[in-house]
Protein backbone atom coordinates (compact mmCIF):
# COMPACT_ATOMS: atom_id res chain seq x y z
CA UNK A 1 0.00 0.00 0.00
CA UNK A 2 1.54 3.30 -1.17
CA UNK A 3 1.83 6.04 1.47
CA UNK A 4 0.11 9.37 0.87
CA UNK A 5 2.32 12.29 -0.07
CA UNK A 6 1.94 16.06 -0.46
CA UNK A 7 -0.22 15.66 -3.57
CA UNK A 8 -2.82 13.52 -1.80
CA UNK A 9 -2.96 15.89 1.20
CA UNK A 10 -3.28 18.91 -1.07
CA UNK A 11 -6.15 17.38 -3.04
CA UNK A 12 -7.88 16.43 0.21
CA UNK A 13 -7.68 19.95 1.65
CA UNK A 14 -8.87 21.52 -1.60
CA UNK A 15 -11.90 19.20 -1.65
CA UNK A 16 -12.66 19.89 2.02
CA UNK A 17 -12.28 23.67 1.55
CA UNK A 18 -14.67 23.61 -1.42
CA UNK A 19 -17.13 21.41 0.50
CA UNK A 20 -17.12 23.78 3.49
CA UNK A 21 -17.57 26.78 1.18
CA UNK A 22 -20.60 25.11 -0.38
CA UNK A 23 -21.97 24.21 3.04
CA UNK A 24 -21.56 27.83 4.24
CA UNK A 25 -23.34 29.04 1.12
CA UNK A 26 -26.23 26.64 1.64
CA UNK A 27 -26.56 27.61 5.31
CA UNK A 28 -26.30 31.36 4.63
CA UNK A 29 -28.48 31.70 1.56
CA UNK A 30 -30.93 28.91 2.28
CA UNK A 31 -32.52 31.17 4.88
CA UNK A 32 -34.93 28.56 6.21
CA UNK A 33 -35.15 25.25 7.96
CA UNK A 34 -34.02 22.52 5.52
CA UNK A 35 -36.83 20.24 4.40
CA UNK A 36 -36.30 16.51 4.78
CA UNK A 37 -36.15 16.11 0.98
CA UNK A 38 -33.59 18.89 0.62
CA UNK A 39 -31.51 17.48 3.48
CA UNK A 40 -31.72 13.98 1.95
CA UNK A 41 -30.41 15.27 -1.38
CA UNK A 42 -27.49 16.99 0.33
CA UNK A 43 -26.81 13.87 2.41
CA UNK A 44 -26.49 11.88 -0.83
CA UNK A 45 -24.09 14.55 -2.12
CA UNK A 46 -21.86 14.39 0.98
CA UNK A 47 -21.89 10.59 1.19
CA UNK A 48 -21.23 10.40 -2.55
CA UNK A 49 -18.30 12.80 -2.13
CA UNK A 50 -16.83 10.59 0.60
CA UNK A 51 -17.19 7.48 -1.56
CA UNK A 52 -15.73 9.22 -4.63
CA UNK A 53 -12.74 10.26 -2.55
CA UNK A 54 -12.34 6.60 -1.57
CA UNK A 55 -12.34 5.62 -5.24
CA UNK A 56 -9.67 8.26 -5.90
CA UNK A 57 -7.62 6.88 -2.98
CA UNK A 58 -7.85 3.40 -4.54
CA UNK A 59 -6.61 4.74 -7.88
CA UNK A 60 -3.77 6.73 -6.33
CA UNK A 61 -2.62 4.46 -3.49
CA UNK A 62 -3.89 1.03 -4.48
CA UNK A 63 -6.96 -1.16 -3.98
CA UNK A 64 -6.01 -2.13 -0.44
CA UNK A 65 -5.79 1.54 0.58
CA UNK A 66 -9.18 2.17 -1.03
CA UNK A 67 -10.77 -0.73 0.85
CA UNK A 68 -9.14 0.37 4.11
CA UNK A 69 -10.42 3.93 3.62
CA UNK A 70 -13.93 2.65 2.91
CA UNK A 71 -13.89 0.47 6.05
CA UNK A 72 -12.65 3.38 8.19
CA UNK A 73 -15.23 5.70 6.59
CA UNK A 74 -18.07 3.27 7.35
CA UNK A 75 -16.92 2.94 10.98
CA UNK A 76 -16.76 6.72 11.38
CA UNK A 77 -20.05 7.37 9.58
CA UNK A 78 -21.92 4.83 11.69
CA UNK A 79 -20.49 6.20 14.94
CA UNK A 80 -21.30 9.74 13.78
CA UNK A 81 -24.93 8.74 13.28
CA UNK A 82 -25.08 7.93 16.99
CA UNK A 83 -24.29 11.61 17.61
CA UNK A 84 -27.71 12.37 16.14
CA UNK A 85 -29.40 10.85 19.19
CA UNK A 86 -27.67 13.46 21.33
CA UNK A 87 -28.26 16.31 18.88
CA UNK A 88 -32.01 15.72 19.06
CA UNK A 89 -31.84 15.72 22.86
CA UNK A 90 -29.58 18.80 23.03
CA UNK A 91 -31.86 20.94 20.87
CA UNK A 92 -34.95 19.74 22.71
CA UNK A 93 -33.44 20.62 26.10
CA UNK A 94 -32.06 24.03 25.09
CA UNK A 95 -35.15 25.04 23.12
CA UNK A 96 -33.16 26.07 20.04
CA UNK A 97 -35.69 26.45 17.19
CA UNK A 98 -35.31 24.33 14.06
CA UNK A 99 -34.45 27.42 11.97
CA UNK A 100 -31.27 27.98 14.02
CA UNK A 101 -30.17 24.39 14.54
CA UNK A 102 -28.17 24.31 11.31
CA UNK A 103 -25.97 27.14 12.66
CA UNK A 104 -25.04 25.24 15.82
CA UNK A 105 -24.42 22.07 13.81
CA UNK A 106 -22.19 23.82 11.26
CA UNK A 107 -19.93 25.42 13.87
CA UNK A 108 -19.97 22.25 15.95
CA UNK A 109 -18.71 20.22 13.00
CA UNK A 110 -16.15 22.91 12.07
CA UNK A 111 -14.76 22.72 15.61
CA UNK A 112 -14.70 18.93 15.37
CA UNK A 113 -12.40 19.14 12.30
CA UNK A 114 -9.74 20.85 14.41
CA UNK A 115 -10.30 18.67 17.48
CA UNK A 116 -10.06 15.45 15.47
CA UNK A 117 -6.82 16.59 13.80
CA UNK A 118 -5.20 17.16 17.22
CA UNK A 119 -6.42 13.87 18.69
CA UNK A 120 -5.47 11.82 15.62
CA UNK A 121 -1.97 13.35 15.50
CA UNK A 122 -1.56 12.52 19.19
CA UNK A 123 -2.82 8.97 18.64
CA UNK A 124 -0.48 8.37 15.69
CA UNK A 125 2.47 9.66 17.74
CA UNK A 126 1.65 7.49 20.77
CA UNK A 127 1.13 4.33 18.71
CA UNK A 128 4.40 4.90 16.86
CA UNK A 129 6.37 5.44 20.09
CA UNK A 130 4.68 3.09 22.55
CA UNK A 131 3.32 -0.29 21.47
CA UNK A 132 1.52 -0.81 24.79
CA UNK A 133 -0.84 2.08 23.94
CA UNK A 134 -2.99 -0.39 21.99
CA UNK A 135 -4.17 -1.86 25.31
CA UNK A 136 -5.68 1.34 26.77
CA UNK A 137 -7.09 2.10 23.30
CA UNK A 138 -8.75 -1.32 23.22
CA UNK A 139 -10.02 -0.76 26.77
CA UNK A 140 -11.58 2.54 25.61
CA UNK A 141 -13.34 0.65 22.82
CA UNK A 142 -14.70 -1.97 25.22
CA UNK A 143 -15.88 0.78 27.59
CA UNK A 144 -17.54 2.56 24.65
CA UNK A 145 -19.25 -0.68 23.64
CA UNK A 146 -20.62 -1.13 27.17
CA UNK A 147 -21.84 2.48 27.11
CA UNK A 148 -23.55 1.88 23.78
CA UNK A 149 -25.24 -1.30 24.99
CA UNK A 150 -26.25 -0.32 28.52
CA UNK A 151 -25.48 3.36 29.18
CA UNK A 152 -28.14 5.23 27.23
CA UNK A 153 -30.14 6.36 30.28
CA UNK A 154 -27.08 7.73 32.11
CA UNK A 155 -25.89 9.46 28.94
CA UNK A 156 -29.30 11.10 28.52
CA UNK A 157 -29.30 12.42 32.09
CA UNK A 158 -25.80 13.87 31.61
CA UNK A 159 -26.84 15.76 28.49
CA UNK A 160 -30.04 16.99 30.13
CA UNK A 161 -28.04 18.37 33.06
CA UNK A 162 -25.56 20.09 30.73
CA UNK A 163 -28.32 21.63 28.60
CA UNK A 164 -30.58 22.89 31.40
CA UNK A 165 -30.57 26.62 30.71
CA UNK A 166 -30.92 27.70 34.34
CA UNK A 167 -28.43 25.25 35.87
CA UNK A 168 -25.97 24.47 33.04
CA UNK A 169 -22.30 24.54 34.03
CA UNK A 170 -21.83 27.05 31.18
CA UNK A 171 -23.56 29.55 33.47
CA UNK A 172 -20.56 29.45 35.81
CA UNK A 173 -18.53 31.28 33.17
CA UNK A 174 -21.14 33.59 31.65
CA UNK A 175 -24.78 34.37 32.52
CA UNK A 176 -27.35 32.73 30.24
CA UNK A 177 -30.52 34.23 28.86
CA UNK A 178 -33.27 31.62 28.51
CA UNK A 179 -34.79 33.22 25.39
CA UNK A 180 -33.49 32.76 21.85
CA UNK A 181 -34.22 36.01 20.00
CA UNK A 182 -31.64 35.86 17.20
CA UNK A 183 -28.96 33.72 15.60
CA UNK A 184 -26.29 35.27 17.82
CA UNK A 185 -24.30 33.22 20.28
CA UNK A 186 -23.97 36.20 22.64
CA UNK A 187 -26.35 39.10 23.33
CA UNK A 188 -26.04 42.26 25.40
CA UNK A 189 -28.86 43.05 27.80
CA UNK A 190 -28.88 46.04 30.16
CA UNK A 191 -25.18 46.50 29.52
CA UNK A 192 -24.30 42.87 30.40
CA UNK A 193 -23.16 40.13 28.04
CA UNK A 194 -25.28 36.95 28.07
CA UNK A 195 -24.90 33.57 26.40
CA UNK A 196 -27.88 32.45 24.35
CA UNK A 197 -29.33 28.91 24.34
CA UNK A 198 -27.66 28.56 20.93
CA UNK A 199 -24.24 28.96 22.56
CA UNK A 200 -25.15 26.44 25.27
CA UNK A 201 -26.18 23.96 22.55
CA UNK A 202 -22.92 24.57 20.65
CA UNK A 203 -20.77 24.05 23.75
CA UNK A 204 -22.56 20.80 24.64
CA UNK A 205 -22.26 19.59 21.02
CA UNK A 206 -18.49 20.20 21.12
CA UNK A 207 -18.14 18.42 24.47
CA UNK A 208 -20.22 15.51 23.15
CA UNK A 209 -17.98 15.26 20.09
CA UNK A 210 -14.91 15.15 22.32
CA UNK A 211 -16.43 12.18 24.17
CA UNK A 212 -17.40 10.46 20.92
CA UNK A 213 -13.93 11.10 19.47
CA UNK A 214 -12.50 9.01 22.30
CA UNK A 215 -14.61 6.15 20.89
CA UNK A 216 -14.30 6.69 17.17
CA UNK A 217 -10.59 7.49 16.85
CA UNK A 218 -9.39 4.31 18.63
CA UNK A 219 -11.96 2.43 16.52
CA UNK A 220 -10.48 3.66 13.26
CA UNK A 221 -6.94 2.98 14.56
CA UNK A 222 -8.04 -0.65 14.81
CA UNK A 223 -8.71 -0.49 11.05
CA UNK A 224 -5.55 1.41 10.02
CA UNK A 225 -2.78 3.50 11.55
CA UNK A 226 -2.15 5.42 8.36
CA UNK A 227 -2.70 9.08 9.38
CA UNK A 228 -3.98 10.04 5.92
CA UNK A 229 -6.64 7.32 5.87
CA UNK A 230 -7.57 7.90 9.52
CA UNK A 231 -8.06 11.66 9.19
CA UNK A 232 -9.70 11.75 5.76
CA UNK A 233 -12.24 9.07 6.71
CA UNK A 234 -13.03 11.04 9.89
CA UNK A 235 -13.55 14.32 8.07
CA UNK A 236 -15.65 12.96 5.21
CA UNK A 237 -17.87 11.18 7.73
CA UNK A 238 -18.38 14.47 9.60
CA UNK A 239 -18.99 16.69 6.55
CA UNK A 240 -22.48 15.40 5.83
CA UNK A 241 -23.58 15.09 9.44
CA UNK A 242 -25.53 18.36 9.45
CA UNK A 243 -27.70 17.35 6.49
CA UNK A 244 -28.07 13.82 7.85
CA UNK A 245 -29.40 15.24 11.12
CA UNK A 246 -32.32 16.92 9.33
CA UNK A 247 -33.05 13.67 7.47
CA UNK A 248 -33.03 11.40 10.51
CA UNK A 249 -34.01 13.70 13.41
CA UNK A 250 -37.64 12.60 13.22
CA UNK A 251 -36.91 8.92 12.68
CA UNK A 252 -33.75 8.37 14.73
CA UNK A 253 -35.66 6.84 17.65
CA UNK A 254 -37.05 4.20 15.31
CA UNK A 255 -33.55 2.76 14.82
CA UNK A 256 -33.92 0.81 18.08
CA UNK A 257 -31.05 -1.59 17.41
CA UNK A 258 -28.54 0.97 16.09
CA UNK A 259 -26.75 1.27 19.44
CA UNK A 260 -26.66 -2.53 19.73
CA UNK A 261 -25.01 -2.64 16.31
CA UNK A 262 -22.54 0.07 17.29
CA UNK A 263 -21.65 -1.75 20.52
CA UNK A 264 -21.08 -5.00 18.62
CA UNK A 265 -18.91 -3.22 16.05
CA UNK A 266 -16.81 -1.60 18.78
CA UNK A 267 -16.22 -5.00 20.40
CA UNK A 268 -15.17 -6.37 17.00
CA UNK A 269 -12.64 -3.58 16.34
CA UNK A 270 -11.31 -3.86 19.92
CA UNK A 271 -10.65 -7.56 19.32
CA UNK A 272 -9.07 -6.74 15.95
CA UNK A 273 -6.73 -4.25 17.60
CA UNK A 274 -5.67 -6.64 20.35
CA UNK A 275 -5.16 -9.61 18.01
CA UNK A 276 -3.49 -7.68 15.17
CA UNK A 277 -0.09 -9.33 15.73
CA UNK A 278 -1.42 -12.89 15.92
CA UNK A 279 -4.40 -12.88 13.53
CA UNK A 280 -4.37 -10.80 10.36
CA UNK A 281 -7.84 -9.63 9.39
CA UNK A 282 -7.75 -8.14 5.91
CA UNK A 283 -9.52 -4.81 5.24
CA UNK A 284 -12.04 -6.52 2.96
CA UNK A 285 -13.01 -8.95 5.75
CA UNK A 286 -13.35 -6.10 8.26
CA UNK A 287 -15.53 -4.21 5.78
CA UNK A 288 -17.76 -7.25 5.24
CA UNK A 289 -18.17 -7.83 9.00
CA UNK A 290 -19.08 -4.20 9.69
CA UNK A 291 -21.56 -4.08 6.80
CA UNK A 292 -23.22 -7.27 8.08
CA UNK A 293 -23.46 -5.90 11.65
CA UNK A 294 -25.21 -2.73 10.54
CA UNK A 295 -27.34 -4.47 7.97
CA UNK A 296 -28.69 -6.75 10.70
CA UNK A 297 -29.21 -3.78 13.08
CA UNK A 298 -31.19 -1.80 10.48
CA UNK A 299 -33.29 -4.78 9.36
CA UNK A 300 -34.02 -5.69 12.99
CA UNK A 301 -35.08 -2.10 13.73
CA UNK A 302 -37.45 -2.24 10.79
CA UNK A 303 -39.02 -5.66 11.23
CA UNK A 304 -38.62 -6.78 14.87
CA UNK A 305 -41.68 -5.52 16.82
CA UNK A 306 -40.99 -3.10 19.66
CA UNK A 307 -42.49 -3.27 23.12
CA UNK A 308 -45.35 -0.98 22.07
CA UNK A 309 -46.13 -3.14 19.08
CA UNK A 310 -46.55 -6.20 21.25
CA UNK A 311 -49.06 -4.53 23.58
Image: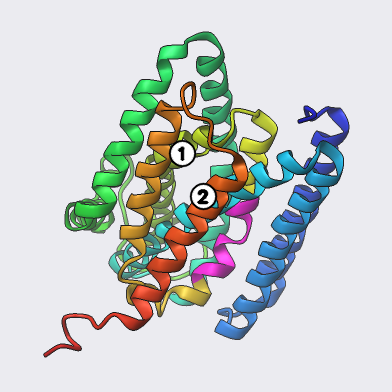
Position of residue 115 relative to residue 97, above or below, is above
Identity of the residue drawn at 38% across and 54% down: 262
For the residues bearing labels 1 and 2, Cβ distance under 8 angstroms: yes
Point out the stretch of residues depicted in magenta.
Answer: 236-245
Q: Nearer the viewer, residue 196 or 124?
A: 124
| 203 left or right, relative to 221 | left
**Rendering quarter of residue 94:** bottom left
> Is residue 108 visible in this depiction of the protein?
no
In the image, residue 15 lies in the stretch drawn in magenta: no
Number of marks drawn: 2
**Residue 300 percent across, percent down from the top left:** 35, 74
- Density class for disc 1 (Cα within 10 Å; few <14, some 14-19, many ≥20) is many
Q: Which mark is residue 75?
A: 2
**Residue 210 percent across, percent down from the top left:** 42, 40
Distance Cα–Cα, label 1 vs label 2: 7 Å
Identity of the residue drawn at 74% across and 60% down: 49
Q: Which residue is mark 1?
A: 219
**Residue 73 percent across, percent down from the top left:** 60, 50
Sooner in the amino-acid sequence: mark 1 or mark 2: 2
Rendered-image quadrant of the N terminus: top right
> Is residue 101 visible in this depiction of the protein?
yes
In the image, residue 240 lies in the stretch drawn in magenta: yes
Identity of the residue drawn at 72% across and 39% down: 65
Rendered-image quadrant of the C terminus: bottom left
Position of residue 78 relative to residue 63, above or below, is below
Amino acid sequence: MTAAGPTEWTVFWIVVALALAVDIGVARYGGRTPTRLNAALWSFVWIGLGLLFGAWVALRLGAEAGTTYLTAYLVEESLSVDNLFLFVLIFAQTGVPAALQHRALFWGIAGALIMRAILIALGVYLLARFHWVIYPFAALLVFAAVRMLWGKEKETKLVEASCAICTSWVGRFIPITPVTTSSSLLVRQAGRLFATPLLVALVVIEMSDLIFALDSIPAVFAVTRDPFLVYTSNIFALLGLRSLYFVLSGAIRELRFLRTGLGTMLLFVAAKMLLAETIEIRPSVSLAVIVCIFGIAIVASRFVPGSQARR
